Image: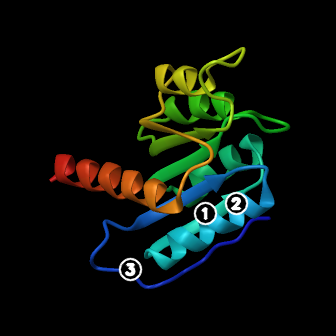
Amino acid sequence: MTALRLVPQDPSRAGGKVLLIDDDPALLDLMAQAFTQAGYVTLTATNGRKGLGLVDSYQPDLVVTDIVMPEMEGIGAILQIKRKPQPPLIIAISGAGPGGRRDYLSWARHLGADEVLAKPFRTSQLLAISDRLIAKKTKHLN
C-alpha cells in the first residue's frame, strides 16, 4: 500500500512530509490518518526496501519505520538512510522491546534513529515526538 495524501498544512503544527514504513496494514493506515489529519503530507510503504526506494524521490522530512519487517528490516533501512548526504529525521518503532532476546529500539537509536517509540503507543505520542523533532530541526536550520 503506497498512498500519497496531500492536505493543507495545519499552521499550529511543524508539518512537513512524512514517510511511514510498517508491514502491519492496520497500523500503517492508522498512522497515515493521524499524520494527515495533523497537517502532514504522508506516504506509506509496507517494508524497508519499498520505503528506502521512496526516500530519494519523496525527500521526506521524517521517516517513521518499524524494525521487524519482511524483505528489509528497519535497521537496514535506517543504516542506508543515514548514509545519505541530507538524511531525514527517523523515528524507529517496534513491539520487540527491552527484556526480549534483543533490544531492537536500542540498536535503532545506536545506529542513527533520532527517536524510538515502543509499541503499543498512542498516535498522539508519535505526533508529539514528530512535531518536536521537526520543530527542533527547523529551528536549528534557521
Task: Name the residue located 24 percent from the left edge and 49 percent from the top edge.
Answer: 136
Q: Which circle's residue, 1 or 3, is located before the other in the chain?
A: 3
Residue 74, quarter of picture? top right
Type of residue at label 1?
Met
- Separation of residues labelled 1 and 3 (CA atoms): 17 Å
Q: Which circle's residue, 2 or 3, is located before the other in the chain?
A: 3
Q: How many marks?
A: 3
Extreme bottom residue here?
8
- Separation of residues labelled 1 and 2 (CA atoms): 5 Å
Mark 2 Cα shell of 10 Å, populated few (<14), some (14-19), many (≥20): many
Task: Name the residue located 44 percent from the left edge and 55 percent from the top edge.
Answer: 125
The relative height of residue 40 versus residue 108 in the rendered view (above or below) is: below
User: In this figure, which residue is indicated by the disc labeled 3?
Assistant: 9
**SS type, badge 3:** loop
Horizontal side of residue 42 vs 1, given as left or right:
left
User: In this figure, which residue is indicated by the disc labeled 2?
Assistant: 28
